[in-house]
Amino acid sequence: MIATPDRTPLPRAFFDRPVLEVAPDLLGRLLVRTTPEGPITLRLTEVEAYDGQNDPGSHAYRGRTPRNDVMFGPPGHVYVYFTYGMWHCMNLVCGPEGRASGVLLRAGEVIEGADLARKRRLSARHDKELAKGPARLATALDVDRALDGTDACATGETTGERGETPLRILTGTPVHSDQVRNGPRTGVSGDGAVHPWRYWIADDPTVSPYRAHVARRRSS
DNA sequence: CGGGGGATGTGCT
DNA sequence: GCACATCCCCCGA
């Protein structure tokens, strides 16, 4: 018997904690993307922590820019960046405000709206690949820079008459600590690679394969 | 399921 | 220039 996930919104205070506490605690939570065709709901299975201070792997490491501005703002908001000339990835900003820490959402299990997600992810061989990897996750949920800065903890009073916001984070079913694994972050090079700040659910089929960062060879 | 190679724009150095 | 919080296609097993 599988317990019904708790659809209570996570309060902003959840994110107003050190990022290394928030990151593993996000596993098993639900991310709801509201689209005109209906909701897509994702159960988070893999995340990575990025600290705004003394973390060379963080986009905020060299200070505030127009691109990473949202990271320096209040917790519970979404930071979306564009990378490799083609892809988007999304993070949830953690506290305290101004520290510019965030959690990269690396993978999840689509538990509702898989048909909608598949329209964006035609190359997925299985449903478990719909959001297996950070850019795939953003693609499946139709997330791009237009949603940068979205408040994932918005309450009814701030979201307008219909109480809908494009992205919301719900309580879901938190994962017991003995099911949480951690290891080096994926795709991070140099000094930032030493931190074992990637967290995932043990044996979950939607977790992305680990690949150590490899510098791309020069093209002709 | 997995490796190899190419594709793309932006922000740094 | 070059690296980049990456993925897809193609092929072989």
Image (cartoon, coloured by chain):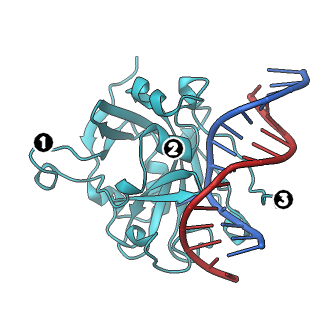
Chain colours: A cyan, B red, C blue
The structure residue drawn at horizontal position 75% and vertical position 53%, both measured from the top left corner, is A212
Q: Which of marks 3 and 2 is nearer the N terminus?
A: 2
Disc 2/disc 1 C-alpha distance (Å): 37 Å
Which of the two marks, 2 or 1, is nearer to us in this view?
Answer: 1
**Residue kind at label 3, given as amino acid type:** Ser
Q: Where residue A153 appears, x then y in whole percent?
A: 27, 53
According to the picture, the residue beneath numbered tag 1 turns out to be: A162
Q: Which numbered circle lies on residue A134?
A: none
Crowding near pointer 1: few (<14 within 10 Å), some, many (20+)?
few
Q: Can residue A77 be seen in this view?
A: yes
Q: Is residue A90 left or right of residue C10?
A: left
The structure residue drawn at horizontal position 29% and vertical position 30%, both measured from the top left corner, is A37
According to the picture, the residue beneath numbered tag 2 turns out to be: A177
Q: Can residue A176 be seen in this view?
A: no
**Residue kind at label 2, given as amino acid type:** Ser
Extreme top residue here?
Answer: A1
Which of the two marks, 3 or 2, is nearer to us in this view?
Answer: 3
The verdict on a common chain for dots 3 and 2 is yes
Q: Which of marks 2 and 1 is nearer the N terminus?
A: 1
Q: Which of A19 and A145 is in front in this view?
A: A145
Up-down: is A13 above or below A10?
below
Q: How many marks?
A: 3
Residue A200 quadrant: top right
**Residue kind at label 1, given as amino acid type:** Arg
According to the picture, the residue beneath numbered tag 3 turns out to be: A220
Q: Where residue A173 appears, x then y in whole percent?
A: 38, 35
Chain hosting mark 3: A
